[in-house]
Amino acid sequence: MTLVDERDLRNEQERKQKIVKTIIRTIIVLVLIIAVLLVYRMIAKKKEFKCVIDGKQNTAVSSNLLYKDSKGKVFIENGKVFVSLRELSNTLGYQFYNSEYKKKGEDKSKCQIQVNNIYTSYIAGSNKIYRAIVLNKDEGNNNSNNNQDDFQDIEEAKKVEFEYFTLEDNVRIENGELYATIEAAQIGFDIAIQYDEKSNTLSICTLDYLENKAKEARTDYAPSSEYSYKDKRLLKYGMVVVKDTQGNYGVASYTRSDKSGTFIASCKYSDIDFNEANSTLSTITNLDKKAGILYLNMAEQSVEKNVTSEYQGIKEITDDFSYFLVKQDGKYGIINSEGKTVLPVAFEEIGVKEEEYSDLTCRYILEDKYVPVKLNGKWGLYNINGKKIIEPQYEEVGCNLAQSGDSVVIIPNIREGITGIVFMYNRAKAFYGLYNADTGERIAVSLTEVFKKVENGEENYYVNHIIDRLTSKAHTLNVRTEI
C-alpha cells in the first residue's frame, strides 16, 4: 500500500468517526430536548386548572370557573379568588336565575342560586348577599314534632325566612358574568371550598360528602334526616349535630382532634336551629322546654355567649343582637340584650311579611325604630323605646299588593324629619292611609295604592289618590314633592 493510499484510508476513517460523533451528539441533543419537553409538559400539566369535587377530580369542569386576568392566569386580589356563579351552578347542578329573589325580570347584574329550598341572591357591585329560605307548610325549626320555639304562627304566615350576610369583597361583573369570592360561594352554594394556588386546584366538598366524614369521625353523629337542612350547614364549618343515648341533641366538632371527646353545645336540647348569618344556635332545652341562644365562634368552634330566657321561644331579630323576639302562650313581645322588656308579650303578631317588601333589613323593626304590632286583629305602631305611636286599629300594615311598582310599608324622608308608614284602613274598598311614623298624624288617605319605583338610580315613592269618589278616578302623586 502506498503512502497515498494510507492517507486516503486514514482520512476516510476520520470522516466516518466525525459522522458517528455527529450522530451521537444529535441523538444526545434530541434526547435532552425530549426530556425537557416531557418535564415541561409535566410541569404544565401539573399547573393546569383542576377541580376536585368530593375527593374526585372532575375533568368536565370549565376552565372559566375561576376569574382570570388578561394573561389567562387566575386573578387573585388580597388573597381572594373569584368564582363564576353561573359556572359553579353548572358544575354542581344547581339552578341559576337572573335577577335577585325579591325582583322580577332578567337583570343580569343580579342572580339567585337555588339549593334545595334556599335561594341566595348576589348583586354586582355589592358586598351584601341574602338568602330566602322557603319553608314547607309543615316544616318546623328542627328535630321535635312538639317544637315550642318555632314561632309557628308567624312563620306559617310568611312562609319565608331571610338571612343577610356582609362580605369583605363586592360581587364583580365581567363580560356579563357575575363573580364572587369563594367565601361568598361557600355561603350561597352550601359547600366547603378552597383554592390551592401552587397546584392551581379548586377543591369542593358538598354537605353530603362532609356528612359522611362526620359519620366516620363521631360515633354520636346524628343523621341529617333527623333535623332541619339549615342545621346541616354546620358541616361547612367542621361542626355537626350529635345526640346522646336519650335522644337529646347537641353540637360537636368532627374536624379537630382536640375536641373529639367534647361538645360545643352539650346534648341537652330537644331542638337546635342554626342561623348561619348570625352564627347562632337557637335552642330548646329538653328538660324544661325553655328557649335560649348560643353565640358561636365559627373559627374556634366554640360557644362565646349563652343567652337564656324564661320564654317558650326566643330569636334574635337584629344583626347586632340588641333585640330579641320572644313568645309565650301564643303571644309575642320584644326584649333587649339585657333581658329587659321593650314590648310586652301581648301581641298576636309583630313585624311585616318580609317577602312582600323590598330592601327591608329587619322585618320586625323598620328603619331601626318602628315596630308594627297586631292586637285583637288590628294593626298599630310602637317605637323601639316601647312608646305607642298608633293605637292598633287598622286592617293591614303596608300596601303589599302594589301593581304599579314595588310594594311599600314605610317611606323614609318624606320631608325633613318625617317618616311615613302605610296602613289599610278600609278592607272593603281597599283604601290605604299614609301616617307620620313618629306622631301618628295623618298625612294622606283615600289611597288605592302606595308604591316605589327606581328611576334614574333614585328611589321615588308614589300614591294613587282618589280624586273623585263617585267614579273612583285616581291621580298619581309623588309623595315627596306633591303631598
Image: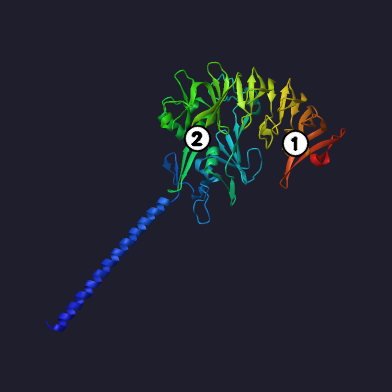
Q: Residue 94: x, y in percent?
A: 53, 39
Which residue corresponds to mark 1? 411
- The N terminus is located in which quarter? bottom left
Residue 229 in sight from this viewpoint:
no
Lower position in the chain sequence, tag 1 or tag 2? 2
Image check: 340 left or right of 184? right
Q: Residue at x 28, y 64 (%)?
A: 27
Q: Quadrant of residue 180?
A: top right
Mark 2 secondary-structure assignment: loop
Cβ–Cβ under 8 Å for marks 1 and 2:
no
Q: Residue 130: x, y in percent?
A: 61, 37
Mark 1 secondary-structure assignment: strand
Q: Quadrant of residue 152?
A: top right
Q: Residue 396: x, y in percent?
A: 74, 27
Rendered view: 391 above or below 49: above
Image check: 322 left or right of 266? right
Characterize the local packing of mark 2: few (<14), some (14-19) or many (20 or more) Cα atoms within 10 angstroms.
few
* Label annotation for residue 129: none
